Image (cartoon, rainbow, N blue to C red):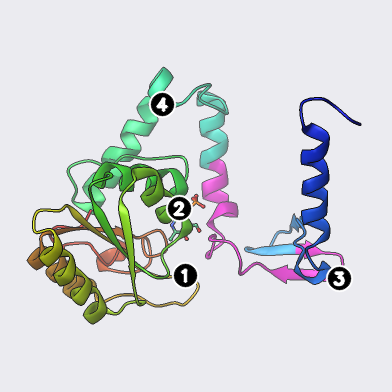
Amino acid sequence: MATDDGTASWREALHRQLQAIPPQRRRQLRSYAPVEAPATLQASHGALLDLASNDYLGFSRHPAVVAAAQAAAATEGVGAGASRLVSGGRPVHADLEAALAIWLGRERVLLFSSGFQANLAAVCGLADRHSLVLADRLIHHSLLVGVRASGAGLQRFHHNDLHHLEQKLQAARRRRPDQRLLVISEGLFSMQGTSPDVARLAHLCERSGAALLLDEAHALGVLGPGGRGLGHGINGIA
Ligand SMILES: Cc1ncc(COP(=O)(O)O)c(C=O)c1O
């Protein structure tokens, strides 16, 4: 339908772009029903083991976890009604943050409703448009969105290559000795199954006067002392 606000031409352009994508490169949204066994999904041709999710150990359907969620829904309801910033948190949030802070040996813990949001907030808290971020080539997209939102400059170093990072840190320091530098990496890169040498990474950042942000999304609960992540016990890691 032709309109005078440009909608029709916008739709046509979008349609042409979609048609230009070869069929084999088009993605489909699929849905599978959960079945009783942990991390298993029902497809039309049989059961599938779900290796794509982060629910590696199938805890999302563990009877104790499900019972606790049911009990919490009965007393707390199913939704806060507004963001925490607007209508405040609940005592259960503060209790969980306090328990996690004790477990991790940290002054405070702040929970977000997704890792994506946490990364956006963390990067914007640690870098601004005057800063330079040096990031592992394979960090998660959410961290890159955070860098873009912060306005900071961005340089990438080869995956887990601390020698390459060191060269970039030295060059950055020579160019602008007092610039705020932020290094970003992950405790466990989930697609590769690789980890940086975190102690060396932290030491290198300290020597260069750079802050270090380590995303432990896949390491927490699995790696490091008592599953507390690879950065646990190492000074200077955000
Ligand atoms: C390393 C890493 N950080 C952050 C995220 C984003 O987490 P979420 O899916 O909870 O938004 C992911 C998601 O897989 C991730 O792999």
Determine which residue is flagged by label 2: 142
Give the alpha-carbon distance from disc 1 to disc 4, as whole Å.
30 Å
**Does the beta carbon at disc 1 come under 8 Å from ligand 1?**
yes
Q: In which quarter of the image is the N terminus?
A: top right
User: CB atoms at circles 2 and 4 under 8 Å apart?
Assistant: no
The residue beneath circle 4 is: 84
Residue drawn 77% across the image and 40% down it: 10
Q: Does residue 48 show up magenta in the picture? A: yes
Q: Earlier in the sequence, mark 2 or mark 1?
A: 2
Q: Name the residue under label 3.
A: 45
Whether residue 135 is visible = yes
Distance Cα–Cα, label 2 vs label 1: 14 Å
Magenta region: 42-67
Q: In this view, does 131 lie above or below 84?
A: below
Residue position marked by numbered label 1 in the rendering = 190
Residue depicted at 55% across the width and 27% down the height: 79
* Residue visible at 28% across and 58% down in the picture: 133
The spot of residue 150 in percent (x, y) is 34, 44
Distance, label 4 to label 3, CA atoms, is 43 Å
Q: Classify mark 4: residues with Cα within 10 Å, few (<14), some (14-19) or many (20+).
A: few
Which type of secondary structure does the marked residue at label 2 adopt? helix
Q: Where is residue 101 in the image (x, y as percent from the top left)?
A: 24, 45
Label 1–label 3 contact, CB within 8 A: no
Of label 3 and label 2, which has the lower sequence position? Answer: 3
Q: In this view, does 57 lie above or below 166?
A: above
Callout 3 amino acid: His
Quadrant location of residue 107?
top left
Q: Are marks 3 and 2 in contact (CB under 8 Å)?
A: no
Local SS, label 4: helix
